[in-house]
Image: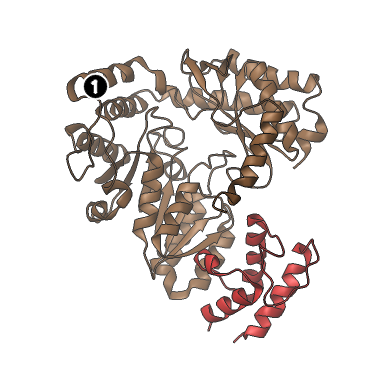
Chain colours: A red, B brown
Amino acid sequence: MVDYQEYLAFIYSALESLNKKKVALSEDTELVGDIGLSSLEVMEFIEKIEDHFDISIPLNILPDVSTIGELAKKIHQLNL
Amino acid sequence: MLFDKFQAMADFRAELAEQDVAPFGAVTEKILSATEGIVQGHKVILAGTNNYLGLSYDARCIAKAQEAAQLWGTGTTGSRLANGSFEGHQALEDEIAAFYGVNHAIAFSTGYAATMGMCATLAGPGDVILMDADSHSSIYSGVKLSGADIIRFKHSNPEDLAKRLRRLGDRAGQALIIAEGIYSMLGDVAPLQEIAELKREYGGYLLVDEAHSMGVLGDSGRGAAQAAGVESDVDFIVGTFSKSLGSVGGFCVSPHAELEHIRFCINAYIFTASSSPSVIASTREALRIISSEPERRTQLWQNSNQLYDGLKSLGLKVGPSASPVVAIEFGDHAKTIACWQGLMERGVYVNLVVPPASPSSNFLLRNSVSAAHTPQQIDTIIAAYASLKDSGLLTSAEHDAA
């Protein structure tokens, strides 16, 4: 069973190449608001997480997610 | 604050205005034939429509529309569930079901309403939808309304779909898989044989949107599923009357008798006025013509090959195979706009496509072919691109950029 911290750690590493503004990343960092991910980049980033953990992340959870911490929490809940 | 989110669009429009071009909602001032018109003051060949079989201006369809308007009036003034079900609506549903060789059909007022309505209604909370990532906006809007879990698979990628079906475990057997026939922007055809095989392996239901492939593919013009020989695996086909049939409206056909109950649960069907009698009448005539005149489809493919080969030989970045939609991808946005304008000045109207209508961050010049184009008109379109190249507007750096 993958725990919250593992999801979080992978999200940080998956964001490295997309974090063009070199924003300092924390659980409170907003994916779109702070890092400035475009909608295409969000999908690319989600696919990386899906393939790494061999899971599918439904699109319909995304409107409730704005920060890195919220995303890790949501994925963790979905895959308990 | 309310309007802040529209600033990016305002900036883009200002940029276009500076270049003195208006590619979106370009006004057609006159239609001269199925393939010619006057658009923004330019007499042009229409190479940016979806008039695949050239039926929008067919004398027989026009006559049927006129006759229906005389007999039935200009509108129904109501929904199909209230006062808006006329004889013609019922007859069209019977005829479209017969065309597809199934027993059940629903006619909608637009193609968008058909696709959105079906996608919003078939699956609900607790269900799961697997959709192609490059699906049309009507599919995205529908699934969003459904309340189901929405999982995207990579565009036309059966391996990715297989992976996602496997990850679903027991839920795969009840999943709704959504794909299109021909994808409208790049003209590529979905790998429906492979998708149908996966459906057979994992279970679930398959919905195919044949909006751009009806009348275009398949021995009798039923679309990509017919061409792939997998119609018996498809649970729902949705499509439109506004492309090959040259009118407006949409449909869903299915072998499942449950479609008759589903009909009464689709908001996009219940809470909108039904199609005008004239629209229904011309659609019925066009449906008859596409069955009785298969040579139109042959001509469409000849024209498509001619345009595809011609643009390819100019070195343009076209798709992997010929199709009635021949799109050219550009990395340089300003050049794309200049080329679109250059084509208008050379008497050719095509579609300028920008994200999110384009599937990537690239801009597209989308050329579409009609059976009604003459070989000379196709040559004129190719010559217009050649002239753009000669004038330096289109250089190898631009057309190869992606």
Q: Position of residue A40 (x, y in %)?
A: 65, 55
Q: Residue at x 45, y 54 (%)?
A: B178
Q: Is residue B166 visible?
A: yes
Left or right: B28 in relation to B20: left
Say left or right for A30 vs B79: right
Q: Quadrant of residue B240?
A: top left
Q: Which residue is mark 1?
A: B69
Q: Secondary structure at mark 1?
A: helix
Q: Is residue B103 above or below residue A80?
A: above
Across and down, in percent, residue B305 comes to 60, 27
The amino acid type, in three-letter code, at marker 1 is Ala
Give above or below for B236 relative to B334.
below
Q: On the image, which quarter does residue A39 sit in?
A: bottom right
Q: Nearer the viewer, residue B273 or B246?
A: B273
Judging depth in this view, the residue of B41 and B301 nearest the camera is B41
In the image, is residue A65 above or below residue B101? below
Q: In which quadrant will I find the N terminus of chain B?
A: bottom right
The answer to whether B331 appears left or right of B246 in the picture is: right
Q: Residues within 10 Å of mark 1 (few under 14, many from 20)?
A: some
The C terminus of chain B: image quadrant: top right
Residue at 40% across, 47% down: B115
Residue at far front of view: B1
x and y, in percent, of residue A23 in the image: 78, 68
